[in-house]
Image: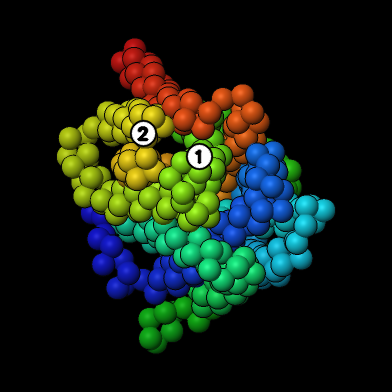
Amino acid sequence: MNLTYTELLKSNRNFRNLLWGQFVSEMGNWFNFIAGLGLVRVVSDASPTAAGILFVARIIPFAVFSPIAGTFVDRFSRRQVMIWSDLARMFIALAFLLVSTADDLWIAYLAMASLSMFGAFFEGAKNAAAPNLTGKEGLLAGTALLFSTRFLLMAIGSALGGFAATFFGYEIAFIINAASFGFSAFSVWLIPDEATRAQLRPRELAEPVIPAPITPAGGFTQTAPLKPPRRESFYSELKEGFHYTVKNRFALTILLMNIIWATGGGAINVIFERMGGVYFADRENWHPDLAVAILWTAGGLGLTLGMLVAHRTEAAIDRNKSHSKFIVATLVIHGILFAVGGIMPTLLLFVVFVFISRALIGVEYAVQETLFQRSLPDRIRGRISTLDRGAEMLVFGLSSYLASELMFLITPQTLTVISGLLSAAAGLVWFFRERNEAKWAKN
């Protein structure tokens, strides 16, 4: 039986602390993103290449360091990794205050890349620890809450970040971002270290427990010292993560599907920047930062709604045993709707299609991620989840940069249509992989 959102939040203080820390830090992250994007647009004279480099700096380091981070968090304290990652990001976020001219853009790129790198370690530790904090019955609700609050903050943080950048300047947004990481570190510090990973039972240890004589109270006075099991080298465990992903059919299906989705999904950074900050800003006289923020807000609200209805959706899917059909349908329809949005004549109509498309992908992702997390053993969860996320983000980043260069050749509307259709193709990957699996099982 799956816990409801209310049951999980009321009964689980450790999860509440993790969720609250993420809530504040994600708010700051979106302040930083909208302000950083606006700052780069201003000092580079709205160069698509400059924006593309910033997108790459935000995504590629995360992708490159994710497999390393996954191995790291499977070996060491997940709580400590999250705390030190937050503290590092708190100071790095202030580096944006040093950017004032085009000659300083390298500082923005380096700061964004560093935030991304440390973000890979934080996300790896958080994702690996979350199933232990929620327990099996709370995993669906926990996954939906973690991701829905993230996407809600995409909406709220984008809106407030755009407002702050428009009326108070970029500096305020960067300071808020730095403070948010400090708060997140404090929230994680409140979580006991042992709560972030599964505890080994005696029979799983290298030496068996040796009971001492029974006391009058009925317990044991002590046990013999236990030697922890010998660990493989860092490289061996890193390689094990890759091997598991390739050999495990379900893990490989998730990886391939997310990579295909990212070929189209990666263009969303450029689409929102060009459609909102340039095309509709000029056509309908919107303030560029505000128009971009509205699009990110619509996307965030849609994803949040999708995540929040995932709990009820999962119950219906379980009854009908229709996970595969649901995933295929939502992936294909969401992509088509996004593509259609690209030909809308006004910003507000485009916003409607963005919202509906993101709502569909939100509920699909909650269902998909819950299935994936339940399939992974705790000892290797950090490596597999970060490898999958890293590969997706690598393609996402490359797609972002390619999309920024395509702006010299095609219109933002054309890019939006291409992006939607490529994202929809992820549903076909799931369909053919699962159909072949069913045929193999029958034989």
Among the two numbered marks 1 and 2 on one chain, the one whose residue lies closer to the N terminus = 1
Q: Nearer the viewer, residue 255 or 108?
A: 108
Q: Quadrant of the C terminus?
A: top left
In the image, residue 359 lies at what x, y percent? Answer: 32, 44
Q: Quadrant of the N terminus?
A: bottom left
Residue drawn 76% across and 65% down?
Answer: 98
Q: Residue furthest bottom?
A: 216
Residue drawn 39% across and 74% down?
Answer: 13
Vertical arrangement, residue 70 with respect to residue 4, above or below: above
In the image, residue 212 lies at what x, y percent? Answer: 52, 76
Q: Residue furthest top?
A: 443
In the image, residue 125 lies at what x, y percent? Answer: 57, 58
Classify mark 2: residues with Cα within 10 Å, few (<14), some (14-19) or many (20+).
some
Tell me if 212 is positioned left or right of 108 in this view. Answer: left
The residue that label 1 is drawn on is: 279
Residue drawn 40% across and 71% down?
Answer: 16
Dot label at residue 246: none
Vertical arrangement, residue 250 with respect to residue 173, above or below: above
Residue drawn 47% across and 30% down?
Answer: 413
Task: Name the residue type under label 2.
Answer: Met
Count all numbered tags in the image, as a single digit.
Answer: 2
The residue that label 2 is drawn on is: 344
Q: Nearer the viewer, residue 183 or 273?
A: 273
State how far apart marks 1 and 2 are (Cα). Answer: 12 Å
Q: Secondary structure at mark 1?
A: helix
Vertical arrangement, residue 443 with respect to residue 386, above or below: above
Task: Name the residue type under label 1.
Answer: Tyr
